Amino acid sequence: EVQLQQSGAELVRPGTSVKLSCKVSGDTITAYYMHFVKQRPGQGLEWIGRIDPEDDSTKYAEKFKNKATLTADTSSNTAYLKLSSLTSEDTATYFCTTGSYYFDYWGQGVMVTVSS
Amino acid sequence: VQMTQSPSYLAASPGESVSISCKASKSISNNLAWYQEKPGKANKLLIHSGSTLQSGTPSRFSGSGSGTDFTLTIRSLESEDFAVYYCQQYNEYPPTFGAGTKLELK
C-alpha cells in the first residue's frame, strides 16, 4: 500500500523560508506526479503545483509561482515543497498527494504557522 | 474553473440518505472527483470520473452528473460517513476544489 509520510509541524518567522518533505513508501516516487495542496484554517483546498519526479518537470498555480518551489529526490523517494518570503497568509496545513488527474493518495498534512 | 458546492453544512441521522451538489463554472465533461476528509486521517478519494467508485469505496456512495452539474449521494448513512466532502475538477489546470460540505450528525 502506498503511504505518504510528511515532515512535522513548523513554526517559522515572517520573511523566512521553510522546506517541507513528503516521503513515499510502498512504491517508487517516479510512478506518480507529486502534488502539494494548501488548506488555510477553516478553509477549503487549494492546489499549489506538481512535480514529475521522472524528469523534474513542474507546473504551478499562478498565485504560487513566486512562492513555492517543488523538488524531488528519487534516491530517497521524497518530494519537497519550499515556501519562501513567508507571511501570515502562508499559515496553513500543506498536504502532499499523488495522481495524474485526481488524487489517489494523500499525506497526513503538515501545519505551518508563520508568526514572530 | 470555479467549483461551487452546496450545501456547506448538512445534518443527518444514520440510515438517512443525503446528496451534495457540485457545480462547475464551465463544462468539465465527467472529470470530477469526490474526497472525504476526516480528522486525523489522510484524505480519501471516493469517486473519480464523475461516477466511478475508487477501490474500497462502499457501494452506498454514488456519483452522478456531467458537464457542469454533479451530485454525490450517500445512501443509508453510517456513523463513519460523518465527515467533510470535497469535489475537485481535473478537466484543466489548475485543478480546483469546491469549498467543502460538512456532514454532521443530527
Image (spheres, rainbow, N blue to C red):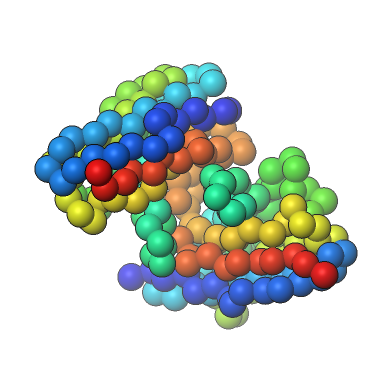
Side of A78 where B52 appears, left or right:
left
Q: At which x and y percent is residue A29? A: 52, 68
Instruction: State the residue in front, A100 or B4.
Output: B4
Q: At which x and y percent is residue A91? A: 69, 59
Q: Is residue A88 above or below residue B10?
A: below
Side of A4 where B104 appears, left or right:
left
Q: At which x and y percent is residue A78? A: 58, 73
Q: How many marks?
A: 0
Q: Residue at x 61, y 52 (%)?
A: A40
Q: Which corner quadrant of the image does residue A113 belong to?
A: bottom right
Q: Which corner quadrant of the image does residue A116 belong to?
A: bottom right
Q: Residue furthest bottom?
A: A76
Q: Residue at x 51, y 38 (%)?
A: B99
Q: Residue at x 71, y 73 (%)?
A: A11
Instruction: State the residue in front, B80 or B11.
Output: B11
Residue B52: tell me if it is visible. no
